[in-house]
Image: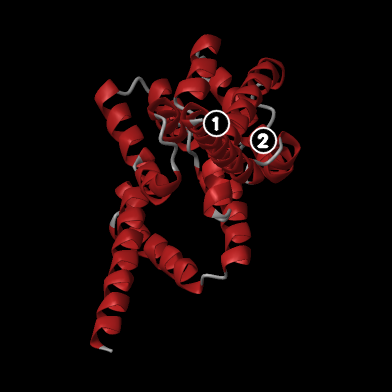
Amino acid sequence: MKNEEKNDSGVETLLDKSRENLEQIIKTSDHVYPWPVLFNKSIPILIAFLAVGGAYGVLAVSVGMPIWFIILSSIITYSGSVQFLTIPLLASSASLSSMFITSFVVSLRFSFYIIALIPTLSKNIFRRWFESVSICDQSFAIMILEPEKAREANLLRFNLLLHAYWTIATVIGIVLGQVIGDLIPHLDFALAALFVILAYEQFKKSRSYFGLAIAVIAFIVAKLFAYNWLILAAILFCAICILGRYFFTNWSKEDI
């Protein structure tokens, strides 16, 4: 009888654990978007990437960059702003140190994105690493507006989708570059247009006038006083304003 009771209790324990695991899987799956949903969310970025990535491919071919290097750059670097900057640097035979410093400064903003997403990054070290290195302005702009659980469940897959878009767009640009060459001027402006659209879409959802105001002020200040380091200066200015607001808000609450 005692053995039967022990067996029954053991079975019940296993069943309880199975139920808990099943409930956890169901809870997690509730936040996992199907691929068609992720694709629907990414359509505006796909359209923009076809223009921007295509523009990069065309411009890179026009200055004589090797095709293998252009594709590898999109796969590994995966940063439109850095890749566009490397075109004139490589064309002018700039030193590796100047290219490295320029790329580092331009990419510094991604560290702020990763810091903001740390609570929702995967616990798996390899997945966490890829989520960090594959983050871009566009995926951050979309995912940061999602609920925390949904962000945690879908960030990696969304990043993979956008990465594929960018690489495919680059290949299309390479093909077009060999056909049309310099027939389409000022293609690099597509990147700036994409940032403006993303900023507008994010403002529509968040209605953060503070964020909009400091972005405009940061650009003006950086343009006037740090033109050669415009992006870095603007980012630092925004970071100081945000931290100042945070500490001021907490200080005011403590006084109350």
- Which residue is outermost to the front? 1
Return the mark for residue 51. Answer: 2
Say if residue 38 shows up in the picture.
yes
Discs 1/2, front: 1
Tell me which label, 1 or 2, sits earlier in the chain: 1
**Residue name at image x 64 percent, y 40 percent:** 29
Quadrant of the rendered image containing residue 108: top left
**Front residue of this view, candidates 229 and 156:** 156
* Residue 222 at x, y percent in the picture: 34, 58
**Residue name at image x 61 percent, y 35 percent:** 52
Q: In the rendered structure, which amino acid carries the disc numbered 1?
A: Val
Say if residue 144 shows up in the picture.
no
In the image, 101: left or right of 215?
Answer: left
Q: How is the image coloured?
A: secondary structure
Reading the image, the residue beneath label 1 is 11
Q: Secondary structure at mark 1?
A: helix
In the image, 211: left or right of 20?
Answer: left
**Residue name at image x 37 percent, y 40 percent:** 106
